[in-house]
Amino acid sequence: MEAVFLTFILMLSIFLGFELISKVPATLHTPLMSGANAISGITVVGALLATGSGHGAISGILGAVAVALAMINVVGGYLVTDRMLAMFKKKENPAAGKGGSRS
Amino acid sequence: MIAEGISLQQLISGTYILSALLFVYGLKMLGKPDTARRGNMLSSVGMLIAIVVTLLAEEILSFQWIVIAAIAGGVVGAFAARMIAMTSMPEMVALFNGSGGLASLMVGWAALYTTGNTTFTVFTIFLAILIGGVTFSGSLVAWGKLSEVMPSGAIVFKAQRLVNGVLLLALIFAGVMLCLNPSTTSNEFYAVIALSLIFGVMVVIPIGGADMPVVISLLNSYSGLAACAAGFAINNVILIVAGSLVGAAGLILTNIMCKAMNRSLANVLFSGFGAVKTATKVEGEVKPIVAEDAFLVLEAASNVTFVPGYGMAVAQAQHVVRELGELLEANGCEVTYAIHPVAGRMPGHMNVLLAEANVPYDQLIEMDEINPRIENVDVAVVIGANDVVNPAAREDENSPIYGMPIINVDKARTVFVLKRSMASGFSGVDNPLFFGDNTRMLFGDAKESLSRVIAEFKS
C-alpha cells in the first residue's frame, strides 16, 4: 500500500515538474539548472536521518559523508544561482550616453 | 509515548508539505526573469525548513557528526559558489550534480542497514545506488571533458556496444540477486556499486564536447531521480517530491537541447557508435578584413547582431563585446545578441556570460526571434560560434549536423566572423559560411580584435 501511495506522489510530482518548467525562457536555463541542482540536494534529509539514527558505524559514516556531499550541493547550488540571477538586469538606465534608439 | 511519537512524525510530515510548496512556487518564479531571484530564495527557505524539521526527528540520536559534516559541506559549497568564474559554470554544475548523485548513492547504501526492508524497498535501494552511481561517475567524466583534463571529443572503441550490453546485463543480474538476498556484505552488493560507477563512465565517454549541453541536462535530471529513488528507499515523501521535480526539469531541458540540434536523445547518446558522415568539403576564397575596415562598416550600420558561441567564453571576450555594443548604441545603432539554444557548453551558458558583462537580458534574443528578420540585420558579428551558424546544416545533406536549426547569419547583409585562424571548428565540420560573398573574416584573438575596433571608435 505504501509503495502505491509513494508511486502516486511520484507521478503527480513529475507531471507538476513538467508543467512548471516547460515555459522557461532560454535566458534562464543555466540558473534554472543550478537552482534545480540545489533542490536535488534534498537528499540531505535522508543523509541526516542515516547519520543520526545509529544503525551501526558504517551507516553513520555513510550518512555523514552524504550530509557533507549534499550540503555542498545545497549551499553551493543556491548561492551560485543567486549570484547569477543578481547579474540579470533589465535595460532601464539610458546612462550609456544618450537615450535608447527604441522608443 | 506512542501518541507523542505520532504527533511529532505528523509535525515533520506536515512541515515537509510546506517545503514542497516552497519548492514548487520557487521553481515557478525561477521561470521569469523579474521573479527568478526571489524564487530561488523561496526554494532555499523550503530547503532550510526541511533540514531543520528533520533534525527534530526521534530517530536522530546524535548530532556531533551531523554538525561537522554539514558545516564542512556548506563551507566547501559556499566557497565554490563565490569563487567560480562564470565561464566555468558548466564544470561546476557537473561537479555539483556528481556530489548530489554520490550523496543519494550513500543514502541508499545506508538504508540497506535498516532491518526489515521489503523487496520493494530493496529494489528502490538498488535504483538509488544505480542512478546515484551513474550520476556521480558520469558527472566526473563530464567535468573532465569540460575542463579538458581529458580529451573532450567522443571516445569510441570497437565492440563498445557489446561491452555496454554485457555491463547492463551484469547490472540487472546483480540487482536481481541483491533484491532476492539483501545484504551489505555480499558480492552482488559490491558488484552493483562497482558496475553502476563503470556504467556511468561508459555512457558519457562516447559523447563529444559539442553535445555537452545535453549531457549536463541529463545528469541534472539523474541527480534528481537519484534523490527520488533514495526517497523511496527510506520512505520519505519530500525526497520523492523534490527529486522528481528536478528530474522533470532536467528532462525538459534535455529535450529542448535535443530539439535545438534536431536530434533524438538516443542519437546524442549513441551517435558515437554509428558511422560518421563526412560533410562535402567546401572550397572557396576567404575574405579577411582588418579591424580598421570592420570599424567603418560597423559605424555605418544601423542594426547589428552579435552571435556568441563557446569561443567567446574561451577568449573571455564578453566584456569587450558589451563595450562595443554600447558604443554602437551610442552611435544610434540597434544592437541585439542572438543566442542559439546550444551555444556554449550548457543550456543558457552565453546568456549568463553576457549578463555578467552587464548586457541587459531584454537585448538577448532567441534563434526563432532573430531568424525571421535576419535579412534586415546590417552586420552579424559571429564570435567564437561555428556549428550554430553553419549553413551546411540547412543545405548539405551529407553534413553530420544536417537538419539542425541554425541562426541564419549568412542571410544578413554583412557577416563578420571572428576567428583565431582557419582551423575548422569543434565538430570538424567545414563551414561554407566562411566563404560566403558577404562574409568577412576578422582573424585573431576575439578579445584583441574587438578591442582594436573599440579603439577606432574612441579615436
Image (cartoon, rainbow, N blue to C red):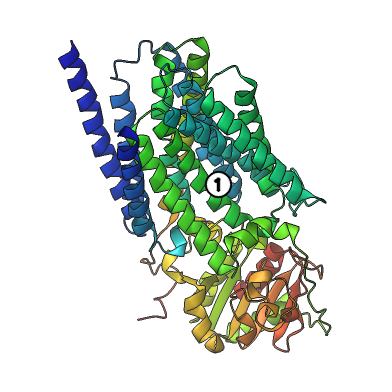
Total numbered circles: 1
**Residue B313, above or below B116:** below
Q: Is residue B11 something one can see in this rendering?
A: yes
Mark 1: secondary structure: helix
Residue drawn where x is 60% and y is 86% of the image: B412
Residue B160, percent from left and from top: 76, 49
Image point (42%, 16%), residue name: B115
Q: Residue A46 falls in which quadrant of the image?
A: top left
Q: Quadrant of the N terminus of chain B?
A: top left
* Residue B31, visible in the rendered structure: no
The residue tagged 1 is B219
Q: Is residue B200 left or right of residue B20?
A: right
Near-viewer residue (B217 or B9) = B9
A100, A8: nearer the viewer: A8
Q: Position of residue B168 (x, y in %)?
A: 65, 42
Pick the quarter of the image with the C terminus of chain B: bottom right
- Residue, x 54% and y 32% (percent of image)? B129
Q: Which chain letter goes with mark 1?
A: B
Q: Position of residue B230 (x, y in %)?
A: 44, 32
